[in-house]
Image (cartoon, grey):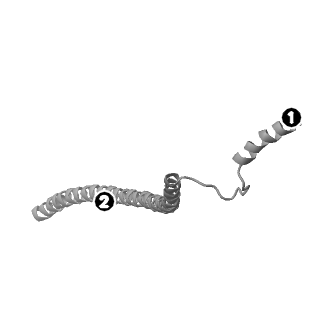
Amino acid sequence: MKKIIYILLMLLPIQLLSQVKTDTTMICFPHKIAKQIAQDLNKLDSLVDINKLTNQELELTERKVIYKDSVIAVMKEKEVNYETIITKEREKFDIVDNQNKELREEITKVRRRRTFFEIFGGAVIGTLGGILILK
């Protein structure tokens, strides 16, 4: 019987020290810690919102960069086309200049021949006229 009393006495203080409620949904914190938890949760919420806005801004910036890259690609293509047009126009002017040069040389040759024939023809006519007059 003594053993039973000892066992009951041993169990009695354990029963007094244990929690009476077994509700795990409610946790008690000191006021200071609860206040710090609330502040941390508010900071977390604001940082999550800032992160969402930053991600949206990043997406918009990426879209802008993609659009600008496409505009740059189009402008480079136009630049290549313009350079091709300029090159073709220069080739055309070079061809025209070469033809003009050839024509000028030909005109110069024709003028020399004409001058030569005029002088030679004048001399021949003058000689023949002189011969006819002297006869």
Q: Which residue is mark 2?
A: 100
Measured as percent of width and height from the top left, residue 7 is found at 83, 38
Rendered image: mark on residue 99: none
Quadrant that contains the N terminus? top right
Q: Where 17 falls versus 43 (above or below)? A: above
Three-letter code for the amino acid on which mark 1 is drawn = Lys
Local packing at callout 2 (Cα closer than 10 Å; few below 14, some 14-19, many 20+) is few
Graded by Cα atoms within 10 Å as few (under 14), some (14 to 19) or many (20 or more), the crowding at tag 1 reads few
Q: Looking at the picture, tell me which residue is in the foreground, 79 or 29.
A: 29
Residue lying furthest left in this view? 134
Three-letter code for the amino acid on which mark 2 is drawn: Asn
Asked if residue 106 lies left or right of residue 125, the reply is right
User: Which of the two residues, 69 or 59, is positioned nearer the viewer here?
Assistant: 59
Q: Position of residue 109 (x, y in %)?
A: 26, 55
Of residue 133 and residue 41, the one placed in the foreground of this image is 41
Disc 1: which residue: 3
The image quadrant of residue 96 is bottom left
Mark 1 vs mark 2: in front: 1
x then y, percent, for residue 38: 52, 58
